[in-house]
Amino acid sequence: MAPLSAKGKFKLAIEDSFDPYAYVIAGAFAGYGQTKDDPKSWGEESWGPYIKRYAASFADQTSENIMTEAVVPWMLKEDPRYFRLGTGGFFKRTGYAVSRIWVTQTDAGHRTFNFSEIMGAGASAGISNFYYPREDRTISANLSRWGVMVGEDTFFNLLKEYWPDIRLKMFKRSHPSDPPF
């Protein structure tokens, strides 16, 4: 497959950031933060704190997408796309999907350590210090956000690997453009 241009990498990051599911995911993370009253200084007894958490969750996702799919891949000439294995047993495909967090392709098609994912998620966690309250600007909080970002991307690799099979079994359709019924 042809490598993505810098423009293509940024387009991918923006599309992923503003995909309809991104809003739902930000809402889920905000809801979780609301139930845990995290960050505490934002409170928990009205819509105001939820909106702050939603905005922070959405900003986390967007900055992480831009760093892992555009900025770092452009700088290091890595391909940010996930390429499905699509065949083999459950353990083989699951192992492959999880390994793509650590291994990626260069723009030239060679395998390499996935600096884009690891460094990009770390940079995004650092960027979040601009909008989280002082109590959440600790090394521990940053490492936690970094881990959540990498974990979320691992989950989405698994979804990308298996969703075409699930969609085919559930809806009897093999391509996203096929009508649902």
Image (cartoon, helix red, strand yellow):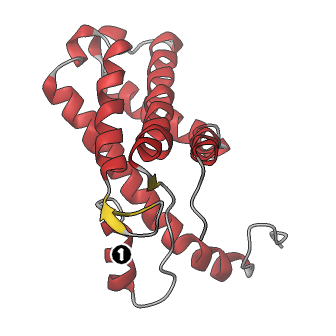
Does the rendering let one see residue 43?
no
Along the line of sight, which residue is nearer the eye, 113 or 151?
Answer: 113
Q: Residue at x 32, y 51 (%)?
A: 151
Q: Residue at x 49, y 88 (%)?
A: 87
* 19 is higher (above) or lower (below) than 1: above
Determine which quarter of the picture holds residue 180: bottom right
Q: Residue at x 52, y 17 (%)?
A: 51
Q: Residue at x 35, y 69 (%)?
A: 111
Quadrant showing the N terminus: bottom right
Determine which quarter of the picture holds residue 144: top left
Left of 146 or right of it: where is 11? right
Q: Position of residue 126 (x, y in %)?
A: 29, 25
Disc tally is 1
* 97 is higher (above) or lower (below) than 152: below
Quadrant showing the C terminus: bottom right
Q: Which residue is mark 1?
A: 96
Q: Amino acid at mark 1?
A: Tyr
What secondary structure is marked by label 1? helix
